[in-house]
Amino acid sequence: MSGIFKAHLEKFISINDKEFEEVFKFFETKTVAKKENLLEEGKICRYHYFVLKGLLRQFFINEKGVEQTTEFAIETWWTTDNIAYEHKQPASFSIQAVEPSEVLYISSENQAVLLQKYPVMERYFRFIYQRAYAASQMRMKYFFSLSKDEFYFQLMRLHPEFVQRVPQYLIASFLGFTPEYLSEIRKKFAS
């Protein structure tokens, strides 16, 4: 599994085998069962997670008591409650495995030491955060500028792997729909 992480790093930075071995020591691995939580809302967020295999989702419980999915993470994507992780405070979100998963994770303390010892990793994380921020901006644009139907079709065009892989009730949650409304949209699309 370390090969997946090394190949991912090499998309952004140059790192030789010896450096990678040292960098990899800062991370731990974990197998996560379907529906197992890596983080629970209200608990201190201690880790940043990298998906080696599987699918994670981040969500919160809204004022109606309904789970609202805010993001997904598939292979080679990172996820955490960024504010809670950075400030070592209670999380505003939960992170849960949608399917059996393998993750790498790093504590904020280890990440601080890693970045100091290997400045090239600072560059890597800058690229990762820039991409995540850009994706968040586009999601907000779609949310405010597209109709619900268009928002779903845009997701299908840009991320067909999600539409095939993620349960429909979670896609509905991510898009801010009810599962019934998503079912209606899918019926329109099929006809």
Image: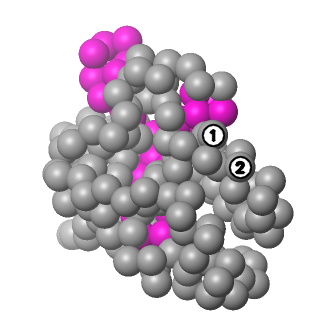
- Disc 1 marks a residue whose amino acid type is Glu
Q: Quadrant of the C terminus?
A: bottom left
Q: Residue furthest top?
A: 63
Q: Disc number at residue 51?
A: none
* Residue 166: x %, y % from top left: 26, 59
Task: Identify the residue under disc 1.
Answer: 109
User: Vertical placement of 104 versus 42: above or below?
Assistant: below
Q: Residue at x 78, y 59 (%)?
A: 117
Q: Are marks 2 and 1 in contact (CB under 8 Å)?
A: yes
Does the segment drawn in magenta span residue 63? yes
Task: For the N terminus, give its image quadrant.
Answer: bottom left
Q: What span is colored magenta in the figure?
A: 59-86
Q: Relative to the observer, which residue lies in front, 85 or 67?
A: 85
Circle 2 residue: 113
Residue 133 versus residue 93 in the image, above or below: below
Q: Residue at x 31, y 63 (%)?
A: 102
**Image check: 86 left or right of 42?**
right
